[in-house]
Amino acid sequence: MEPEKLIVSNSVLLGEAVLMLENGKDVVIPTKGNSMLPFIRGERDTVTLRKMDAYEVGDIVLARMGGKYVLHRIWSLEGQKVTLMGDGNLRGKEACGLGDLRGTVISINKPSGKTVDPFSDSHRRQAAAWRKLMPFRRIILGVYRRLI
C-alpha cells in the first residue's frame, strides 16, 4: 500500500519548520524550483536546516521576506543588512535583515543517499568559483538544464 500524499503550501510547511528551528530542532525540507541550481535541484534534493547564531558570505539560508520564504545563498553581509542571491539566478538579488534569517542549510541531501556538506572546503571553493562565473551563468545553466 502506497502512503497517502499530503500537499501543503510552502507558507504552512516552512512556518512549521521555522517553529521547530526556533525550538532547537534540525529540520529536513524538500526543495522547489531552480533558483539554487546547480548545487540544489528542486523537486529532487532535500536540505537539512539548523538555527545558527552567526552567518558568513556563502552560507545557504532560509529567509522570510515579504511574507514568503526563500532558500538562497548569502551574497554579502554589511552590518545588519544581508543580500541574498540564488545560485541559479542570473540577476535579482534580495535584501533582508539578519533578523529575517530563519535557518542555515547544514546538509544537502541527494536522492542517491549522498549528503553534501555546504561548509566543506570543497563546496565553498565550488560556490566561490560559481560566483565568479556570473557573466557566463546563462550559458552554463542552459547546458546544465538540457543535460539533467
Image (cartoon, rainbow, N blue to C red):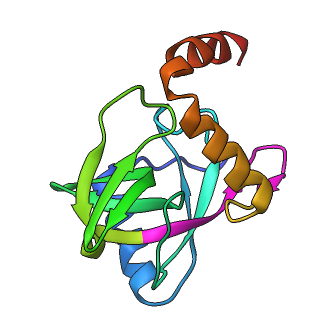
x%, y% of residue 142? 57, 12
Find out whether residue 57 is within the magenta segment.
no
Q: Relative to residue 53, is residue 78 drawn left or right? A: left
Can the viewer see residue 104? yes
Q: Main secondary structure of the magenta part?
A: strand
Please name whichever residue, 71 or 122, is drawn nearer the observer in this view of the structure. Answer: 122
Q: Residue at x 46, y 50 (%)?
A: 6
x%, y% of residue 140? 62, 17
Kindly give the residue lying farthest to the bottom in the view shown. Answer: 23
Q: Quadrant of the C terminus?
A: top right
Q: Residue at x 49, y 21 (%)?
A: 135
Quadrant in the picture for residue 93 = top left
Q: Residue at x 32, y 49 (%)?
A: 9
Find out whether residue 107 is within the magenta segment.
yes
Can the viewer see residue 43? no
Please name whichever residue, 124 or 43, is drawn nearer the observer in this view of the structure. Answer: 124
Quadrant in the picture for residue 141 = top right
Q: Relative to residue 29, is residue 83 drawn left or right? A: left
Span highlighted in magenta in the image:
103-116
Q: Relative to residue 112, is residue 65 drawn left or right? A: left
When the figure is inspected, residue 18 is found, relative to residue 31, above or below; the finding is below
x%, y% of residue 86? 44, 41
